[in-house]
Structure formats: structure tokens, C-alpha cells
Image (cartoon, grey):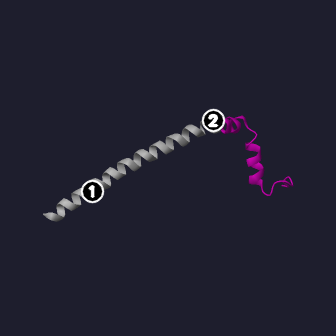
């Protein structure tokens, strides 16, 4: 089967056809609109994880130090 000259493979041709669907366009719009919220959530969640990780490291250091004395 001969492909269009602007496409190098059948898969690229299929991808181009999928980009013309309503679902792809809706997903692109929704992702663009929601990206700032996704980025802020990721930043906040990473901060929370880093905070609790710091608490865990401090507690591990304290308990390791107290066990070494006994």
C-alpha cells in the first residue's frame, strides 16, 4: 500500500488521522486548560512529601543516635 509522501510510515499516517478526531481535540484543550492546576498540585504534593521526608530523616537520626548510646 502506497502512503502519502508527507508521511514516512503507515503509523505516522495513522497518528495524523487520529489527531483529527473530536476526542483528541477535546483532550488537547482540556489538558491545556488543566495544566496549571496539574503543575501546582505536583509542586504542592512534592513539597509535602519533602516535608515529611525531612521529619522522617530527623527522627531516624535521633533514634539511631539514642540506640548507639545503649
Rendered location of residue 49, percent (x, y): 40, 48
Residue on which the image places disc 2: 33
Q: Is residue 1 above or below residue 47?
A: below
State the residue at coordinates (18%, 59%): 66
Q: Nearer the viewer, residue 44 or 19?
A: 44
Splitting the image into 4 quarters, where does residue 68 fall? bottom left
The stretch drawn in magenta includes residue 69? no
Circle 1 is placed at which residue position? 60
Q: What range of the chain is rendered magenta? A: 1-29
Expressed as whole percent of the image width and height from the top left, the position of residue 29 reads: 67, 36
* Residue reaching furthest to the left: 70
User: Is residue 61 or residue 23 the one in the foreground?
Assistant: 61
* Residue 11 colored in magenta in the image: yes
Identify which residue is drawn at 76% across, 53% down: 12
Image quarter of the C terminus: bottom left
Q: Is residue 25 above or below residue 64?
A: above
Q: Are marks 2 and 1 in contact (CB under 8 Å)?
A: no
Closer to the camera, 14 or 22? 22
Q: Position of residue 46 (x, y in %)?
A: 45, 47
Classify residue 66 as left or right of residue 41: left
| Number of numbered labels in the structure image | 2
Q: Is residue 22 above or below residue 16?
A: above
**N-term-proximal mark, 2 vs 1:** 2
SS category of the residue bearing label 2: helix
Badge 2 local density, few (<14 within 10 Å), some, or many (20+)? few
Q: Residue 36, how many percent across, how many down?
A: 58, 39
Quarter of the view holding residue 38: top right
Which residue is rendered at x = 44% and y = 46% of the image? 47
At x 78% / y 50%, what residue is drawn? 13
Amino acid at each position: 500500500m502506497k502512503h502519502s509522501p508527507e508521511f514516512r510510515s503507515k503509523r505516522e499516517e495513522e497518528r495524523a488521522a487520529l489527531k483529527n478526531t473530536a476526542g483528541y481535540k477535546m483532550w488537547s484543550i482540556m489538558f491545556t486548560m488543566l495544566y496549571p492546576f496539574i503543575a501546582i498540585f505536583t509542586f504542592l504534593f512534592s513539597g509535602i512529601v519533602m516535608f515529611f521526608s525531612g521529619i522522617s530523616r530527623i527522627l531516624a537520626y535521633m533514634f539511631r543516635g539514642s540506640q548507639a548510646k545503649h
